[in-house]
Image (spheres, helix red, strand yellow):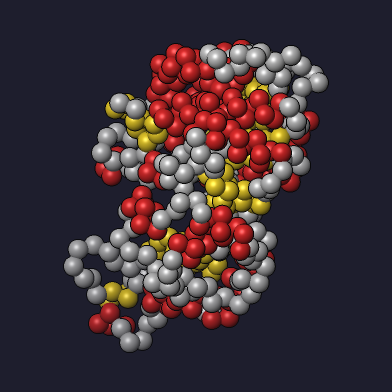
Amino acid sequence: MRDNGLYKNLDSYIRNSRKEFENKLAEMVEIPSVSSDPEHQPDIMKCAEVASQYLRDLGAAAAPIKTPGNPVVFGSIVTGKDNPTVTIYNHLDVQPADPSEWNKAPFKFFKTGDRYEGRGTTDDKGPALTALMAVRYALDHQIPLNFKFIWELEEEIGSPNFDYFVRKNRKELKSDSFLVSDTIWISRTQPAVPYGLRGLQAFIFSLQTHAKDVHSGLVGGVARNPIGEMAQVISQCYDAKTGKVRIPGFYDDVLDATKAELASFVNSGFTTKGYQKAHELKSIRPNLKNEADVLRAFMAAPTFELHGITGGYSGPGVKTIVPYHAEAKISTRLVPNQDADKISRLVKDFVKKINPDVKVEAIQTLEPFSGDFTGPYADAARVAMKFAFGKDPAFTREGGSIGAVVTLQKHLKAPINFLGLSLPEHGYHAKNENYDWRQTSGGIKMFVKYFEEISKL
Ligand SMILES: [Zn+2]
Protein backbone atom coordinates (compact mmCIF):
# COMPACT_ATOMS: atom_id res chain seq x y z
CA MET A 1 0.00 0.00 0.00
CA ARG A 2 2.84 2.35 0.73
CA ASP A 3 5.03 3.91 -1.90
CA ASN A 4 8.38 2.16 -1.42
CA GLY A 5 10.19 5.17 -2.76
CA LEU A 6 8.77 7.33 0.01
CA TYR A 7 12.09 8.97 0.77
CA LYS A 8 13.57 8.85 -2.72
CA ASN A 9 12.28 12.28 -3.73
CA LEU A 10 12.32 13.87 -0.31
CA ASP A 11 15.61 15.74 -0.56
CA SER A 12 14.79 17.18 -3.96
CA TYR A 13 11.26 18.03 -2.80
CA ILE A 14 12.74 19.94 0.15
CA ARG A 15 15.15 21.84 -2.10
CA ASN A 16 12.41 22.66 -4.57
CA SER A 17 10.05 23.86 -1.82
CA ARG A 18 12.49 26.35 -0.37
CA LYS A 19 11.38 29.35 -2.41
CA GLU A 20 7.74 28.72 -1.62
CA PHE A 21 8.48 28.26 2.08
CA GLU A 22 10.40 31.52 2.23
CA ASN A 23 7.69 33.41 0.35
CA LYS A 24 5.01 32.14 2.69
CA LEU A 25 7.11 32.87 5.79
CA ALA A 26 7.76 36.39 4.49
CA GLU A 27 4.06 36.95 3.86
CA MET A 28 3.22 35.70 7.37
CA VAL A 29 5.93 37.70 9.17
CA GLU A 30 4.80 40.88 7.44
CA ILE A 31 1.30 40.48 8.86
CA PRO A 32 1.91 41.73 12.44
CA SER A 33 -0.55 39.38 14.16
CA VAL A 34 0.13 40.67 17.69
CA SER A 35 -2.64 39.23 19.84
CA SER A 36 -2.03 41.39 22.92
CA ASP A 37 -2.72 44.68 21.11
CA PRO A 38 -6.30 45.45 20.00
CA GLU A 39 -4.90 47.77 17.31
CA HIS A 40 -3.64 44.68 15.48
CA GLN A 41 -7.11 43.11 15.26
CA PRO A 42 -7.28 43.64 11.47
CA ASP A 43 -3.90 41.89 11.13
CA ILE A 44 -5.18 38.94 13.14
CA MET A 45 -8.15 38.63 10.77
CA LYS A 46 -5.93 38.96 7.71
CA CYS A 47 -3.53 36.35 9.06
CA ALA A 48 -6.45 33.96 9.59
CA GLU A 49 -7.63 34.48 5.99
CA VAL A 50 -4.19 34.03 4.43
CA ALA A 51 -3.50 30.93 6.53
CA SER A 52 -6.86 29.37 5.63
CA GLN A 53 -6.01 29.90 1.97
CA TYR A 54 -2.68 28.06 2.45
CA LEU A 55 -4.62 25.10 3.81
CA ARG A 56 -7.17 25.21 0.99
CA ASP A 57 -4.32 25.27 -1.53
CA LEU A 58 -3.18 22.02 0.06
CA GLY A 59 -6.60 20.50 -0.57
CA ALA A 60 -8.03 21.00 2.90
CA ALA A 61 -11.49 22.15 3.83
CA ALA A 62 -10.40 25.14 5.89
CA ALA A 63 -11.72 28.38 7.38
CA PRO A 64 -11.28 30.68 10.36
CA ILE A 65 -13.67 29.46 13.08
CA LYS A 66 -15.26 32.17 15.22
CA THR A 67 -14.84 32.36 18.99
CA PRO A 68 -15.74 35.18 21.38
CA GLY A 69 -12.15 36.37 20.80
CA ASN A 70 -9.82 35.78 17.87
CA PRO A 71 -10.76 33.10 15.35
CA VAL A 72 -8.99 29.73 15.17
CA VAL A 73 -7.95 28.53 11.72
CA PHE A 74 -9.13 24.95 11.29
CA GLY A 75 -8.47 22.68 8.31
CA SER A 76 -9.13 19.05 7.55
CA ILE A 77 -7.95 16.63 4.86
CA VAL A 78 -9.49 13.17 4.73
CA THR A 79 -7.48 10.64 2.74
CA GLY A 80 -9.45 7.57 3.82
CA LYS A 81 -12.05 7.03 6.50
CA ASP A 82 -10.17 4.07 7.97
CA ASN A 83 -6.88 5.94 8.14
CA PRO A 84 -5.73 7.31 11.50
CA THR A 85 -5.99 11.06 12.00
CA VAL A 86 -3.28 13.37 13.29
CA THR A 87 -4.05 16.94 14.27
CA ILE A 88 -1.25 19.45 13.99
CA TYR A 89 -1.32 22.38 16.39
CA ASN A 90 0.57 25.64 15.87
CA HIS A 91 -0.18 29.27 16.66
CA LEU A 92 0.07 32.21 14.29
CA ASP A 93 -0.23 35.10 16.70
CA VAL A 94 3.00 36.70 17.87
CA GLN A 95 4.51 38.65 20.74
CA PRO A 96 4.73 42.43 20.39
CA ALA A 97 8.06 43.89 19.20
CA ASP A 98 9.59 47.26 19.99
CA PRO A 99 11.42 48.38 16.80
CA SER A 100 13.85 50.51 18.84
CA GLU A 101 15.28 47.35 20.43
CA TRP A 102 15.69 45.39 17.18
CA ASN A 103 18.59 45.51 14.74
CA LYS A 104 16.11 45.45 11.83
CA ALA A 105 12.42 46.18 11.42
CA PRO A 106 10.64 43.39 13.38
CA PHE A 107 7.70 43.02 10.99
CA LYS A 108 9.78 42.92 7.82
CA PHE A 109 11.14 39.59 6.62
CA PHE A 110 14.91 39.45 6.18
CA LYS A 111 16.81 36.55 4.68
CA THR A 112 20.57 36.39 5.11
CA GLY A 113 21.94 33.11 3.74
CA ASP A 114 20.14 30.40 5.66
CA ARG A 115 18.90 32.73 8.38
CA TYR A 116 15.41 34.23 8.48
CA GLU A 117 14.66 37.23 10.67
CA GLY A 118 11.43 38.78 11.83
CA ARG A 119 8.85 38.50 14.61
CA GLY A 120 7.15 35.11 14.47
CA THR A 121 9.81 33.38 12.35
CA THR A 122 10.50 30.79 15.08
CA ASP A 123 7.46 31.32 17.34
CA ASP A 124 5.54 29.89 15.69
CA LYS A 125 4.99 30.74 12.02
CA GLY A 126 8.17 29.04 10.75
CA PRO A 127 7.44 25.68 12.42
CA ALA A 128 3.78 25.87 11.27
CA LEU A 129 4.83 26.30 7.64
CA THR A 130 7.50 23.60 7.98
CA ALA A 131 4.78 21.14 8.99
CA LEU A 132 2.61 22.35 6.11
CA MET A 133 5.35 21.52 3.59
CA ALA A 134 5.74 18.05 5.12
CA VAL A 135 2.01 17.34 4.94
CA ARG A 136 2.00 18.10 1.24
CA TYR A 137 4.76 15.56 0.68
CA ALA A 138 2.89 13.01 2.79
CA LEU A 139 -0.25 13.55 0.70
CA ASP A 140 1.62 13.33 -2.60
CA HIS A 141 3.18 10.06 -1.46
CA GLN A 142 0.00 8.51 -0.07
CA ILE A 143 1.01 8.15 3.56
CA PRO A 144 -2.27 6.74 4.90
CA LEU A 145 -3.11 9.46 7.41
CA ASN A 146 -5.88 12.03 7.70
CA PHE A 147 -4.65 15.47 8.62
CA LYS A 148 -6.25 18.22 10.65
CA PHE A 149 -4.76 21.61 11.43
CA ILE A 150 -5.41 23.90 14.37
CA TRP A 151 -3.74 27.29 14.00
CA GLU A 152 -4.53 29.37 17.05
CA LEU A 153 -4.41 33.18 17.18
CA GLU A 154 -4.50 33.78 20.94
CA GLU A 155 -1.64 31.61 22.21
CA GLU A 156 0.55 34.51 23.27
CA ILE A 157 -2.21 35.89 25.50
CA GLY A 158 -2.87 32.61 27.27
CA SER A 159 -5.50 31.04 24.97
CA PRO A 160 -8.53 32.62 26.67
CA ASN A 161 -11.04 31.22 24.15
CA PHE A 162 -9.41 27.95 23.19
CA ASP A 163 -11.47 25.99 25.68
CA TYR A 164 -14.62 27.43 24.08
CA PHE A 165 -13.34 26.52 20.61
CA VAL A 166 -12.57 22.93 21.57
CA ARG A 167 -15.87 22.39 23.38
CA LYS A 168 -17.89 23.82 20.47
CA ASN A 169 -16.06 21.80 17.84
CA ARG A 170 -15.36 18.64 19.78
CA LYS A 171 -16.66 16.33 17.05
CA GLU A 172 -14.68 17.93 14.24
CA LEU A 173 -11.53 17.88 16.37
CA LYS A 174 -11.63 14.17 17.15
CA SER A 175 -8.20 12.77 16.44
CA ASP A 176 -6.05 9.72 17.13
CA SER A 177 -3.16 11.93 18.18
CA PHE A 178 -2.01 15.53 18.36
CA LEU A 179 1.26 16.99 17.23
CA VAL A 180 2.45 20.28 18.69
CA SER A 181 5.38 22.15 17.19
CA ASP A 182 6.07 25.14 19.42
CA THR A 183 8.97 24.09 21.64
CA ILE A 184 12.72 24.63 21.87
CA TRP A 185 15.71 22.30 21.61
CA ILE A 186 18.45 22.12 24.23
CA SER A 187 21.00 23.42 21.73
CA ARG A 188 21.62 23.42 17.97
CA THR A 189 23.30 20.03 18.25
CA GLN A 190 20.85 18.48 20.67
CA PRO A 191 17.23 17.95 19.61
CA ALA A 192 14.70 17.72 22.42
CA VAL A 193 11.24 16.27 22.75
CA PRO A 194 9.50 17.73 25.77
CA TYR A 195 6.80 15.70 27.53
CA GLY A 196 5.93 18.24 30.20
CA LEU A 197 5.18 21.94 30.33
CA ARG A 198 5.02 24.35 33.20
CA GLY A 199 1.77 26.14 33.91
CA LEU A 200 1.30 29.75 34.89
CA GLN A 201 -0.70 31.82 37.31
CA ALA A 202 -0.24 35.55 36.98
CA PHE A 203 -1.14 38.23 39.52
CA ILE A 204 -1.40 41.97 39.86
CA PHE A 205 -0.63 43.25 43.35
CA SER A 206 -1.77 46.83 43.98
CA LEU A 207 -1.68 49.17 46.93
CA GLN A 208 -3.05 52.69 47.27
CA THR A 209 -2.36 54.45 50.58
CA HIS A 210 -3.61 57.96 49.85
CA ALA A 211 -5.18 60.08 47.09
CA LYS A 212 -2.18 61.66 45.36
CA ASP A 213 1.61 62.05 45.48
CA VAL A 214 2.56 64.37 48.38
CA HIS A 215 5.70 66.36 49.22
CA SER A 216 7.97 64.30 51.47
CA GLY A 217 9.03 67.45 53.35
CA LEU A 218 5.45 67.81 54.53
CA VAL A 219 4.30 64.26 55.15
CA GLY A 220 7.54 62.24 55.11
CA GLY A 221 7.73 60.27 58.36
CA VAL A 222 3.96 60.22 58.65
CA ALA A 223 2.53 59.02 55.35
CA ARG A 224 2.76 55.35 54.40
CA ASN A 225 4.88 54.53 51.37
CA PRO A 226 3.09 52.07 49.06
CA ILE A 227 6.17 51.20 46.99
CA GLY A 228 8.17 50.39 50.10
CA GLU A 229 5.35 48.30 51.50
CA MET A 230 4.96 46.52 48.19
CA ALA A 231 8.68 45.69 48.15
CA GLN A 232 8.35 44.32 51.67
CA VAL A 233 5.40 42.12 50.75
CA ILE A 234 7.27 40.74 47.75
CA SER A 235 10.40 40.05 49.75
CA GLN A 236 8.29 38.05 52.20
CA CYS A 237 6.75 36.05 49.35
CA TYR A 238 10.11 34.83 48.10
CA ASP A 239 13.85 35.03 48.56
CA ALA A 240 14.93 37.06 45.55
CA LYS A 241 18.49 35.72 45.70
CA THR A 242 17.69 32.02 45.53
CA GLY A 243 14.16 32.23 44.19
CA LYS A 244 12.86 30.08 47.04
CA VAL A 245 9.17 30.77 47.61
CA ARG A 246 8.22 31.42 51.24
CA ILE A 247 4.46 31.12 50.87
CA PRO A 248 3.34 28.19 53.06
CA GLY A 249 2.05 25.22 51.03
CA PHE A 250 3.43 26.51 47.73
CA TYR A 251 5.59 23.44 47.12
CA ASP A 252 3.19 20.84 48.62
CA ASP A 253 1.93 19.27 45.37
CA VAL A 254 5.09 19.58 43.26
CA LEU A 255 5.86 16.41 41.35
CA ASP A 256 9.62 16.58 41.51
CA ALA A 257 11.72 15.25 38.67
CA THR A 258 12.72 11.63 39.29
CA LYS A 259 16.38 10.59 39.30
CA ALA A 260 15.86 9.02 35.86
CA GLU A 261 14.31 12.21 34.51
CA LEU A 262 17.09 14.38 35.89
CA ALA A 263 19.66 12.01 34.42
CA SER A 264 17.99 12.25 31.03
CA PHE A 265 18.00 16.08 31.25
CA VAL A 266 21.68 16.07 32.22
CA ASN A 267 22.64 13.59 29.49
CA SER A 268 21.15 15.92 26.91
CA GLY A 269 24.48 17.66 26.49
CA PHE A 270 23.19 20.77 28.21
CA THR A 271 25.81 23.13 29.58
CA THR A 272 25.15 26.04 31.90
CA LYS A 273 27.70 28.05 29.96
CA GLY A 274 25.91 27.54 26.66
CA TYR A 275 22.57 28.30 28.26
CA GLN A 276 23.87 31.56 29.72
CA LYS A 277 25.32 32.51 26.37
CA ALA A 278 22.13 31.75 24.43
CA HIS A 279 20.06 33.88 26.79
CA GLU A 280 22.72 36.51 27.49
CA LEU A 281 22.71 35.93 31.25
CA LYS A 282 25.80 37.48 32.82
CA SER A 283 25.38 35.52 36.02
CA ILE A 284 22.83 33.17 37.54
CA ARG A 285 21.45 32.43 41.00
CA PRO A 286 24.21 31.44 43.41
CA ASN A 287 22.43 28.39 44.79
CA LEU A 288 22.51 26.61 41.41
CA LYS A 289 25.75 24.66 41.68
CA ASN A 290 25.70 22.37 38.66
CA GLU A 291 23.90 21.47 35.42
CA ALA A 292 21.31 19.33 37.22
CA ASP A 293 20.39 22.25 39.51
CA VAL A 294 19.96 24.59 36.56
CA LEU A 295 17.91 22.10 34.54
CA ARG A 296 15.65 21.29 37.45
CA ALA A 297 15.18 25.02 38.14
CA PHE A 298 13.77 25.87 34.72
CA MET A 299 12.21 22.56 33.69
CA ALA A 300 10.81 20.94 36.77
CA ALA A 301 10.54 23.50 39.57
CA PRO A 302 7.92 26.21 40.13
CA THR A 303 8.86 29.87 40.32
CA PHE A 304 7.70 33.19 41.71
CA GLU A 305 8.70 35.99 39.37
CA LEU A 306 8.42 39.76 39.63
CA HIS A 307 7.95 41.20 36.12
CA GLY A 308 7.60 44.86 36.91
CA ILE A 309 6.79 47.32 39.64
CA THR A 310 5.39 50.78 39.03
CA GLY A 311 4.42 53.86 40.99
CA GLY A 312 6.09 57.05 42.17
CA TYR A 313 8.63 59.00 40.20
CA SER A 314 11.00 57.54 37.64
CA GLY A 315 12.13 60.59 35.63
CA PRO A 316 15.62 62.11 35.77
CA GLY A 317 17.08 63.03 39.14
CA VAL A 318 14.99 62.76 42.30
CA LYS A 319 11.55 64.14 42.97
CA THR A 320 10.84 64.28 46.71
CA ILE A 321 7.37 62.84 46.89
CA VAL A 322 5.67 60.19 48.90
CA PRO A 323 3.88 58.22 46.18
CA TYR A 324 0.26 57.20 46.64
CA HIS A 325 0.13 54.03 44.63
CA ALA A 326 2.17 50.96 43.71
CA GLU A 327 1.50 48.09 41.38
CA ALA A 328 3.50 44.89 40.88
CA LYS A 329 3.13 42.40 38.04
CA ILE A 330 3.90 38.90 39.20
CA SER A 331 3.58 35.35 37.98
CA THR A 332 4.19 31.89 39.28
CA ARG A 333 5.27 29.14 36.88
CA LEU A 334 3.69 25.88 38.00
CA VAL A 335 4.75 22.27 37.53
CA PRO A 336 2.77 19.00 37.44
CA ASN A 337 0.65 18.38 39.98
CA GLN A 338 0.29 21.96 41.20
CA ASP A 339 -3.16 23.43 40.82
CA ALA A 340 -3.45 27.04 39.66
CA ASP A 341 -6.58 27.77 41.75
CA LYS A 342 -4.95 26.44 44.88
CA ILE A 343 -1.79 28.49 44.27
CA SER A 344 -3.91 31.54 43.65
CA ARG A 345 -5.66 31.03 47.00
CA LEU A 346 -2.37 30.48 48.86
CA VAL A 347 -0.87 33.68 47.43
CA LYS A 348 -3.97 35.74 48.23
CA ASP A 349 -4.21 34.42 51.80
CA PHE A 350 -0.53 34.97 52.47
CA VAL A 351 -0.48 38.55 51.19
CA LYS A 352 -3.66 39.34 53.10
CA LYS A 353 -2.05 38.13 56.31
CA ILE A 354 1.09 40.24 55.94
CA ASN A 355 -0.51 43.36 54.45
CA PRO A 356 -4.32 43.40 54.22
CA ASP A 357 -4.32 46.63 52.20
CA VAL A 358 -2.55 45.03 49.24
CA LYS A 359 -5.09 43.91 46.66
CA VAL A 360 -4.23 40.73 44.80
CA GLU A 361 -5.90 40.07 41.49
CA ALA A 362 -5.33 36.69 39.82
CA ILE A 363 -5.25 36.90 36.04
CA GLN A 364 -4.30 34.49 33.27
CA THR A 365 -4.24 30.86 34.30
CA LEU A 366 -2.50 28.01 32.49
CA GLU A 367 -2.42 24.57 34.06
CA PRO A 368 0.82 22.56 33.85
CA PHE A 369 0.93 19.62 31.46
CA SER A 370 2.48 16.22 31.76
CA GLY A 371 2.54 13.67 28.95
CA ASP A 372 4.35 10.45 28.10
CA PHE A 373 7.98 9.95 27.25
CA THR A 374 7.51 6.26 26.56
CA GLY A 375 5.12 4.40 24.26
CA PRO A 376 4.56 4.23 20.49
CA TYR A 377 4.19 7.99 19.86
CA ALA A 378 7.31 8.83 21.83
CA ASP A 379 9.09 6.10 19.86
CA ALA A 380 7.86 7.62 16.59
CA ALA A 381 9.16 11.01 17.71
CA ARG A 382 12.55 9.52 18.57
CA VAL A 383 12.84 7.71 15.23
CA ALA A 384 11.80 10.82 13.29
CA MET A 385 14.23 13.16 15.04
CA LYS A 386 17.10 10.73 14.57
CA PHE A 387 16.22 10.19 10.90
CA ALA A 388 16.18 13.91 10.17
CA PHE A 389 18.93 15.25 12.43
CA GLY A 390 21.14 12.21 13.01
CA LYS A 391 20.77 12.26 16.76
CA ASP A 392 18.42 10.83 19.37
CA PRO A 393 16.38 13.57 21.02
CA ALA A 394 16.59 14.20 24.74
CA PHE A 395 13.25 13.80 26.49
CA THR A 396 12.83 16.88 28.65
CA ARG A 397 10.28 19.01 30.39
CA GLU A 398 9.88 22.51 29.07
CA GLY A 399 9.85 25.58 31.28
CA GLY A 400 7.27 27.48 29.24
CA SER A 401 3.53 27.04 29.00
CA ILE A 402 1.16 26.28 26.12
CA GLY A 403 -2.35 26.58 27.50
CA ALA A 404 -3.97 24.99 24.46
CA VAL A 405 -2.20 21.70 25.12
CA VAL A 406 -3.87 21.23 28.48
CA THR A 407 -7.24 22.02 26.89
CA LEU A 408 -6.68 19.42 24.15
CA GLN A 409 -5.72 16.83 26.74
CA LYS A 410 -8.74 17.60 28.91
CA HIS A 411 -11.43 17.49 26.22
CA LEU A 412 -10.08 15.23 23.50
CA LYS A 413 -8.11 12.62 25.43
CA ALA A 414 -5.63 11.53 22.77
CA PRO A 415 -1.83 11.31 22.92
CA ILE A 416 -0.07 14.65 22.46
CA ASN A 417 3.45 14.79 21.08
CA PHE A 418 5.85 17.69 20.84
CA LEU A 419 8.11 17.97 17.83
CA GLY A 420 9.60 21.42 18.09
CA LEU A 421 12.21 22.99 15.85
CA SER A 422 13.17 26.22 17.59
CA LEU A 423 16.66 26.77 19.02
CA PRO A 424 17.66 28.74 22.13
CA GLU A 425 19.44 31.34 19.97
CA HIS A 426 16.31 31.92 17.87
CA GLY A 427 15.15 34.48 20.41
CA TYR A 428 11.72 33.26 21.53
CA HIS A 429 9.76 36.30 22.75
CA ALA A 430 12.96 38.36 22.45
CA LYS A 431 14.36 40.95 20.10
CA ASN A 432 15.87 39.89 16.74
CA GLU A 433 13.80 36.71 16.56
CA ASN A 434 15.00 34.34 13.83
CA TYR A 435 14.66 30.88 12.32
CA ASP A 436 16.76 29.04 9.79
CA TRP A 437 16.79 26.76 6.78
CA ARG A 438 18.55 23.92 8.57
CA GLN A 439 15.67 23.62 11.02
CA THR A 440 13.17 23.97 8.18
CA SER A 441 14.71 21.37 5.86
CA GLY A 442 15.43 18.96 8.73
CA GLY A 443 11.97 19.69 10.09
CA ILE A 444 10.22 18.68 6.86
CA LYS A 445 12.16 15.42 6.89
CA MET A 446 11.33 14.84 10.55
CA PHE A 447 7.60 15.40 10.08
CA VAL A 448 7.42 13.13 7.02
CA LYS A 449 9.15 10.33 8.95
CA TYR A 450 6.92 10.90 11.97
CA PHE A 451 3.81 10.74 9.77
CA GLU A 452 4.93 7.46 8.26
CA GLU A 453 5.67 6.00 11.69
CA ILE A 454 2.33 6.94 13.24
CA SER A 455 0.39 5.87 10.15
CA LYS A 456 1.36 2.31 11.09
CA LEU A 457 -0.07 2.54 14.62
ZN1 LIG B 1 4.84 29.86 20.70
Is residue 323 placed above or below 10 in the rendered structure?
below
Q: Nearer the viewer, residue 145 or 101?
A: 145
Picture quarter containing residue 177?
top right
Quarter of the picture holding the N terminus: top right
Label total for image: 0
Q: Nearer the viewer, residue 21 or 333?
A: 21
* x, y percent for residue 273: 35, 57
Q: Can the viewer see residue 77?
A: no
Q: Please, is residue 398 above or below residue 133 in the view?
A: below
Judged from this view, the residue extending furthest toward the right is 82
Closer to us: 344 or 251 = 251
Q: Is residue 251 left or right of residue 99?
A: right
Query: Which picture quadrant has residue 175?
Result: top right
Residue 322: x percent and y percent? 32, 76
Q: Residue furthest left?
A: 317
Whether residue 410 can be seen here: yes
- 31 left or right, relative to 300: left
Q: Residue at x 74, y 39 (%)?
A: 414
Image quadrant occupied by the C terminus = top right
Q: Position of residue 261 (x, y in %)?
A: 60, 58
- The correct choice, above or below, for 170 with respect to 200 in the image is above
Q: Residue at x 33, y 64 (%)?
A: 283
Q: Is residue 34 above or below residue 55?
A: below
* Residue 153, x across and y down, in percent: 55, 35
Left or right: residue 370 versus residue 83 is left
Locate residue 337: give its quadrant: bottom right
Residue at the image point whose x is 68% and y is 38% from the top: 377
Residue furthest to the bottom: 221
